[in-house]
Image (cartoon, helix red, strand yellow):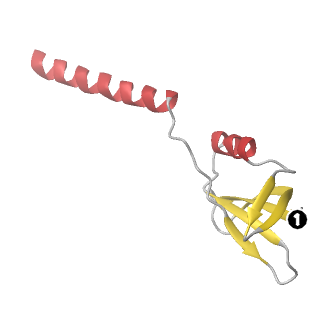
Amino acid sequence: MVVVTAVLLVIVIAIIFCVVHTLRHPVPISFEPVFKTFPDGSVQMEFSGVEGAKRTKRFHEEYQVGMPIEYEGQAYTIAQIKEHHEAGMVYAKIITAYLERA
């Protein structure tokens, strides 16, 4: 009985250690944009996988209005950033950055 209790205690301590370590040292997130070019020459960058307050905050620290972006050899700046949810999916947040030529 003592051995079983000791094993369970070690397992619980290991789980707590893993949870605390994960919360204190999160995995860095890289935001990979999907570029969309429209017939009128406008370009948008769409980012998915930005659910949660921490990821959204980190996104806004990395991408800001007025930031220069280069796409297909052209210089652009971020004119506007909008957040919206994917239709039909409750947790699928998408952030769109509207680009204008610099």
Say which residue appears at 11% left-offset and 15% top-offset: 2
Q: Along the line of sight, which residue is nearer the eye, 8 or 57?
A: 57
In the displayed structure image, the side of residue 100 where residue 10 appears, left or right:
left
Residue 83's quadrant in the figure?
bottom right
Kind of residue at badge 1:
Glu
Q: Can I make out residue 84 in this image?
A: yes
| Image coordinates for residue 16, horizontal then vertical, percent | 37, 25
Q: Quadrant of the C terminus?
A: bottom right
Q: Quadrant of the N terminus?
A: top left
Say which residue appears at 87% left-offset and 57% top-offset: 80
Q: Can I make out residue 1 in this image?
A: no
Disc 1, SS: strand
Residue 12's quadrant in the figure?
top left
Where is 49 relative to 23, above or below? Answer: below
Where is 24 relative to 38, above or below? Answer: above
Residue 42's quadrant in the figure?
bottom right
Q: Along the line of sight, which residue is nearer the eye, 8 or 30?
A: 30
Question: Which residue position holds label 1?
Answer: 100
